[in-house]
Amino acid sequence: MGGVRAGPNRRIRGSHRRRLLDHLSDGPSTVSVAGKAVGLRLPHASAELKRMRAEGLVQSDSDSSQRGAKQQLTAAGWELL
């Protein structure tokens, strides 16, 4: 499956990642709401958002392990879109 070009040499690989980023472009969201919006089970959405936080694409408004924490795009996440 090919990625979507974003930025000079970066790609968004994976449709779930792309849909999560698109969902977060509408505003901050909890992991559970974001997962439901893109059709992912909670553990999969959580794992993907954790990877995106580690890559600096997403940040949390509080401790990322806290329930109800809102995830939002960082400047790097916006640039990738």
Image (cartoon, rainbow, N blue to C red):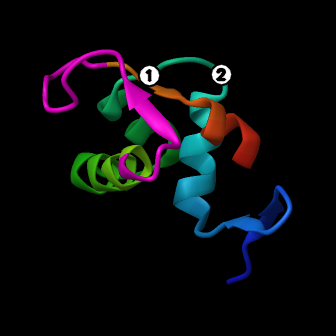
> Would you name the residue on which mark 2 appears?
26
User: Helix or strand or loop: what does disc 1 sit on?
Assistant: loop
Q: Which mark is residue 40?
A: none
53 on left or right of 2: left
Q: Which residues are magenta?
A: 54-69
As helix, strand or loop, the secondary structure at mark 2 comes to loop
Q: Residue at x 39, y 43 (%)?
A: 53
View extreme (left): residue: 66
The residue shown at (33%, 33%) is 31
Counting from the top left corner in percent of width and height, residue 50 is at 31, 48
The answer to whether residue 13 is above or below residue 61 is below
* Residue that appears at 61% across and 63% down: 15
At x 38%, y 46%, the residue is 49
Quote the CA–CA distance across marks 2 and 1: 9 Å
Q: Position of residue 25 (x, y in %)?
A: 66, 28
Check whether the beta carbons of the residues at disc 2 and disc 1 lie within 8 A of each other.
Answer: yes
* Residue 36 visible in this rendered orientation of the protein: yes
At label 2, counting other C-alpha atoms closer than 10 Å, the crowd grade (few under 14, some 14-19, many 20 or more) is few
* 2 on left or right of 39: right
Q: Quadrant of the C terminus?
A: top right
Name the kind of residue labelled 2 in the image.
Asp
Residue wearing tag 1: 29
Horizontal side of residue 25 vs 59, given as left or right: right
Front residue of this view, candidates 39 and 77: 77
Q: Residue 12 location, x and y as percent?
A: 67, 62
